């Protein structure tokens, strides 16, 4: 989900002030149910203003009256508690992976109503065919959730420019210059969901969305490096509680950081990239499992747990390469933590020892503490959760986008 631009300067219009106050009231209610009087006391708005704004939020289906507030020791009739509408607009997230598709619906509180993952090999398939399968998965998830989505965000394994509309390149899918929203809308219509085809659609790199999910849901600090893998290796850089995107939106291509400049040729055209040592294809090849199909993470975890030496050596080599790349990022960025997510989270027992050894040896500006490297509790759910929750957060930040202003 693309975060809002920086603070705007200049006088605010009356409509702009009303939208800001709607967001202020909704934010107070989102943190805990409370009465109109309590919202007024917390926000500094008058009770009359809060009542007017609350009625608008109720009319637009964002807020409901939950009944009398609990007694606060004050004399008089208790107020009526306002809370987020559990049947109100939701956030719809979608994910296109090399070996899977995903769909997720969350409510206004960010709680997951429906989450589906379909194992399907998308490498080399035409975008139109993939979009039809994804549209069918989304249609079913929305119907099952019973919620009306306010928007849709798509997580993809490739470069998405600053505009968020075009997948510039996804090497592991074999896609280039795919206009994602334009490709998905006709597929949604084709599966009988014209209302979903009218939703605002955004797209982002899967690692970026995984990093944002870690920030919002996983207890991430304000400064951290999130590293994840499915087919390729990606990262998200969070600085001051915001995602660092770079000048063109391409920051975080961790898989193409060189760890051994004289190493093998990468698909990107360079030599010795991290992905050549810690990506799916490289690890399976090193483990002697290059011809195996299916969930590579589950397979490696099973074989490593059984003590297969070739698999253990392959994962140790991947951990070492990850540690070398992470050490360079730590020395450059000074994050509070390095968080391992995506498929890597399940391979924690076999990746972390080698990573810690490399970090301890290479982060020399100040001593490296092992606890600064940790595994995300969101695991492989991160990108899909980040996509869906980002839609809801955008609604809470600006309820006027739904016509409430």
Image: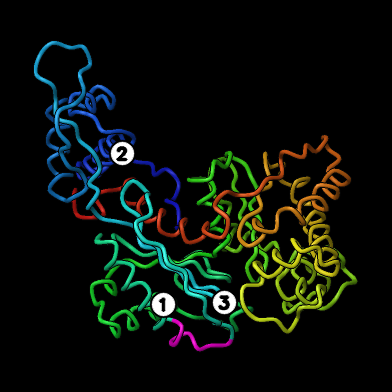
Residue at numbered disc 3: 99
Dot placed on the residue nearer the N-terminal end, 3 or 1: 3
Residue 221 falls in image quadrant: top right
Does residue 303 lie above or below 389 as drawn? below
The residues bearing labels 3 and 1 have C-alpha atoms spaced at a distance of 13 Å
Which mark, by number, is residue 134? Answer: 1
Which residue is at the front of the view, 261 or 28? 28
Which mark, by number, is residue 248? Answer: none
Dot placed on the residue nearer the N-terminal end, 1 or 2: 2
Q: How many marks?
A: 3
Q: Left or right: where does residue 190 sit relative to residue 348?
A: left
Residue at the image point whose x is 26% and y is 54% from the top = 401
Residue at numbered disc 2: 30
Q: Can residue 94 be spotted in the picture?
A: no
The residues bearing labels 2 and 3 have C-alpha atoms spaced at a distance of 36 Å
In the picture, the quarter occupied by the N terminus is bottom left
Asked if residue 129 lies in the magenta stretch, the reply is: yes
Q: Left or right: where does residue 14 sit relative to residue 220?
A: left
């Amino acid at each position: 989900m693309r975060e809002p631009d920086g603070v705007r300067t200049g006088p605010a219009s009356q409509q702009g002030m009303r939208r800001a106050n709607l967001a202020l009231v909704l934010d107070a209610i989102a943190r805990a149910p409370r009465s109109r009087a309590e919202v007024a006391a917390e926000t500094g708005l008058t009770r009359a203003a809060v009542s007017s704004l609350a009625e608008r939020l109720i009319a637009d289906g964002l807020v409901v009256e939950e009944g009398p507030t609990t007694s606060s020791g004050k004399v008089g009739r208790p107020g009526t508690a306002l809370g987020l509408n559990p049947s109100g607009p939701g956030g719809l997230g979608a994910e296109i992976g090399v070996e899977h598709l995903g769909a997720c619906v969350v409510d206004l509180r960010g709680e997951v109503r429906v989450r589906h993952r379909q194992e399907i090999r998308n490498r080399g398939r035409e975008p139109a065919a993939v979009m039809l399968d994804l549209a069918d998965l989304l249609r079913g998830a929305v119907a099952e959730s019973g919620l009306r989505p306010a928007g849709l965000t798509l997580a993809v394994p490739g470069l998405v420019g600053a505009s968020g509309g075009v997948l510039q390149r996804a090497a592991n899918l074999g896609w280039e210059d795919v206009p994602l929203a334009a490709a998905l809308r006709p597929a949604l219509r084709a599966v009988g969901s014209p209302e979903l085809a009218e939703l605002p659609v955004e797209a982002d790199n899967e690692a970026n969305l995984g990093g944002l999910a870690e920030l919002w849901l996983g207890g991430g600090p304000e400064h951290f490096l999130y590293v994840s893998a499915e087919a390729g290796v990606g990262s998200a850089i969070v600085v001051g509680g915001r995602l660092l995107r770079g000048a063109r939106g391409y920051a975080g291509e961790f898989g193409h950081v060189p760890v051994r400049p004289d190493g093998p040729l990468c698909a990107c055209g360079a030599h010795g990239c991290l992905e050549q040592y810690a990506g799916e294809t490289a690890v399976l090849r090193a483990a002697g499992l290059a011809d195996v199909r299916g969930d590579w993470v589950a397979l490696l975890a099973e074989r490593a747990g059984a003590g297969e030496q070739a698999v253990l050596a392959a994962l140790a080599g991947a951990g070492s390469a990850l540690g070398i790349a992470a050490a360079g990022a730590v020395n450059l960025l000074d994050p509070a933590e390095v968080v391992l997510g995506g498929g890597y989270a399940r391979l924690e027992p076999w990746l972390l020892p080698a990573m810690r050894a490399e970090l301890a040896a290479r982060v020399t500006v100040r001593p490296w503490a092992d606890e600064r490297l940790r595994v995300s509790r969101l695991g492989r759910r991160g990108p899909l959760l980040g996509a869906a929750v980002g839609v809801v957060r955008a609604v809470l930040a600006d309820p006027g986008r739904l016509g409430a202003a």
